[in-house]
Structure formats: structure tokens, C-alpha cells
Amino acid sequence: MGTTQLESVPEPKYWHLKTVLSDALDQDFAVGEVLPNERELAARFGVARATLRQALEQLELEGRLQRRRGVGTTVAPPRVGVAVGSAQQGWPGEGADGWEAVDAVETVPAAAVLGVLGTAADEPVHTVRRTRVTQGQAVAAELLYVPAASVPGLSAIDAPAGPARARAVMRELQRLPLEGQDRSVELGSARADDAKELDRLPGAPVLLVTTRYFTAAGTAAVSVATYRADTCRLTFGDSGVEITETRAAS
Amino acid sequence: MGTTQLESVPEPKYWHLKTVLSDALDQDFAVGEVLPNERELAARFGVARATLRQALEQLELEGRLQRRRGVGTTVAPPRVGVAVGSAQQGWPGEGADGWEAVDAVETVPAAAVLGVLGTAADEPVHTVRRTRVTQGQAVAAELLYVPAASVPGLSAIDAPAGPARARAVMRELQRLPLEGQDRSVELGSARADDAKELDRLPGAPVLLVTTRYFTAAGTAAVSVATYRADTCRLTFGDSGVEITETRAAS
DNA sequence: TAGTGGTCTAGACCACAGA
DNA sequence: CTGTGGTCTAGACCACTAA
């Protein structure tokens, strides 16, 4: 062989591996198909298992693969488009959009949430847990924080903890005149309880959607929704149309 | 020692480590402060460096840390809120929102983009590159795809490649009557060129914001914006208010 | 040149799912 | 029980930054 210029740009092995695997997924595998196990794949590509795993991790992050302990690695279906910001605003629980009330208790939110709520640490806050299911799959877990001061009528209705109580809180909320809302999206990692709800391991990448609901009196409620980042594409449709297909990055 | 019940729930070391580090960051470190190097931290906690790195990775993902090769690990400032969906719609380039045109060429987009654009592979498409800077920091890189058919007036203006040409494409776009737009957000990993633009390593986690712009004739343009997931919080303000503080997950 | 984080290896053991 | 992915170790070398 001649003095071929090589290694001038030493691309990391896992990066190159990811590209190769990605192409293979496009050409030789169908959705749902199981890949060879990690030890065999590593051997086949002549790399250590850790290196192979680094490539698989990236592909999972991009929603191309799905890995389950004790089962194997399968080719993931395209991401599910989940409507988050519909054209018209509304209180949580209005309309049948896949959310299901799970529970409601009175807690002291984390400091970060208190900052968004704008309440003090000793104020009682109703915390409603909801789950969102789309196409038979749990895609999001939500914690809805409602200061007791926002729903004074609720104290009379002392429903027992559970879905009924959760619905009672939201019913009271919906009586208020909604003045506005705003929303933010950021990357996070799943807390242990959310991970369990979403059938993922703790620390799995998630999209955190924080929504503030305003009345004339100020911030009436704050929702922190945790979406599975691997399987979800959040859609904010200002028009009625839906994006049908997308694929993450190169 | 008595038979203390231990290890009943064998929490992974890196997970526990992350919690410990997270608390330490809150209490003993200021923003911008540099942490001890990885080898020392690993030794201090009695774990392998790889395990320590797993914890650091998570914290970086949550925007708590910033790691730079050859420099060190520093405590990251709170995430920057970046306005993405303002109240009123508009073509890209309207208003001074931190975007800066870089370049424009005629390319064949990736298959995934073609699907969203709804064009064929042989149709010429102007591809505009833009960069978004907020508070002195590059937060996003965008590729704006404009089918030549959308801007028939452009062929006359044969500006040379470069910022001037990019601005020419957007100027033509802004002449069209915008009928609507929709947007989606998903997790991805940075392509090599975007990573360079954002001062990150290839594969770094990013938030992909895909926007479709409609005229009466159909999809006139598609924008794929790549935001740094570690430093950015995307805001969709329906009201004029801004979320001031947030922290990702527990 | 010294010190940092980034990559990679070749093992080991563990937790979990399913037959 | 077997086979899977998840965790962890103790090294090594490389790429980059800044003095």
C-alpha cells in the first residue's frame, strides 16, 4: 500500500460505528426487529463492548433504537408526535387529550418549583399526578402544582386521596378565569418515580415541559410534565396541520 | 455493627454519586467555579473514573456542569431562556431576535427533510445557514430550507454565496403572505458541523426545533434549528411574561 | 510541557425477562 | 435456568488547552 493519508482526522470509533449502524438500520432492519446482542455486535465490529454501547446509546438517544434489559435491542418505530401547545389555551384536564389523573396530595414542592410558583415554602400546595398515554404507550408523567390559595373552594370537598381527589382539584381550577399561560421546554433526566411511570430507567433523558397558568391574581398553577425523549416529538401546532415525519440529526 | 439492613435497594453508584455531587454543587460551589479533576474526584469517592464520569455526564445533561477538554469541569450558570415561539408568527429574519445569516447554497436536503418539505429529491432547494447568539453565547445553528419554487424572484438576484445571499433568500421569503406555521421539538445529537458551530463535541445532546412555514400554496419553507440542550431552555410564551428560574429534574 | 477531559480496552459481576 | 442489557473496574493512550 502506498503512503495513503490516513488518520488525518481520527474520528472516534464509536462515532464511526454509529454511522455504520445507522445505515444498517435503514437498509437491513425493519421496525421492531431485534438486533444481535451487544457482545456479538462488539465482536463483529472488533471493538470493546463499552465502545459499542457508546454508539448504541447515541442511537437510542436519537430514537432509532430501544433497549430493554433482559430482552434485547430492537429497532424503534418513528417518534410519536405529541401535541403540547394546541391553538387555544386551556386549563389542564379540559378536553380528552390522553391525560389521566392518578393522584393528588398536599406536599411541599422542590425549591425550583417554588421559585416558578412564586409561593413560600410553608404554603400548602396541592400536587396532582397525571399520566399521559398515546397510542397505548405511556409518554409523559406530570406533576401539577396548585397552591391551596388558588382553589379556596376545595377545602370543603375533602375527597380521599386518589384519582377522585385529583379530578376535584382540576375541577376547581377550571372554574377560574384563565388569563394566560406560558411554557418552556428543556432537557432533563428522569427522576426515579417518573422513570418507573414511563417504564424507563432512572436518569433516562426526558423533555421537561413547564407550564405556568395565570389568572388576574397571578400564577394559579404550575405544571411540570416529563416526556420520554426517546419516543416523543413534541408538537406545537399553530395551524391545524401535523408534521408527519422527521428524523433526528445526521 | 448490627445486621443493618443494607443494599436492599442496590441503587447504582453513579446515581448516588450524582445526588451527592448535586447537593455539593448547591452548597459548596459558586457558578463558574472549577471542580477538582476527574481522577481526583474518582479517588475521593472511591470509584473508578468511568463511574465518576457517568455521574458527571448526567449533571452536564441537566445543565449543572460544563466540561471542556484541556481546561476542566466548571459549575454551569442557570440555563438561558431562549424565546422560540413568540406570540405572533413571522417569517425567519423578521425582527432582531439574535439570528445572524451565515451563508446560503443550493443543496439536496436529507431524505427526512425532503419528507417534511414535501418536495422531490431533484428539486433545487436553497439552504440558508443561520446562527443564533444570546448573551454572547452561540445557542443555536439553523438550516433553513427554501425550495426554489417558493421564491421565483430570487433567480434574478444572483448574489454570491455568503451572508448577502442568505439575506436575499429570506428577503424574498418575507414577500410572501404567511398563512400559518407549526413547530415540533425533539431530542437529537449534534451533527459534526453544527457541533463545531455551537462549540460542542459531535454527538452532544441538542434540541431540534423543526418549523414549517405555510402559504396558501403549501409548505413554503422548513427550518431545522439545533439548540444546545445543555445551556438552553426553550420558551414558548403565549403571554408576555418570562419564566425566571427552573431546574431540571431531581 | 503539564494537566485536563475524551476515548478505548478486556475483563467482571449484577438485575431482569422469559422459557 | 439462560441470555439479555446495566453497572463497574483499573488500567492505557489520545486530543486539546494554557502556561
Image: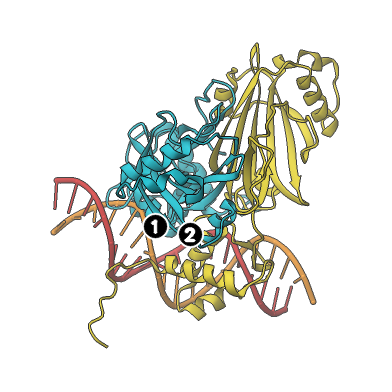
Chain colours: A yellow, B cyan, C orange, D red
Q: Which mark is residue A112?
A: none
Residue that appears at 52% across and 23% down: B242
Q: Amino acid at mark 2?
A: Ser
Position of residue B10 in the picture relative to residue A149 (left or right):
left
Chain letter, disc 2 residue = A
Depicted B203 relative to depicted B133: above or below: below
Question: In the displayed structure, would residue A14 be above or below residue B195?
Answer: below
Left or right relative to A180: residue A43: left
CB under 8 Å between callouts 2 and 1?
A: yes
Q: Residue furthest front?
A: B156
Residue D5 quadrant: bottom right
Task: State which chain disc 1 sits on.
Answer: B
Which residue has dot 2 on it? A250
Q: Secondary structure at mark 2?
A: loop
State the residue in front, B166 or B239. Answer: B166
Q: Where is residue A248 drawn, in percent x and y? A: 54, 55
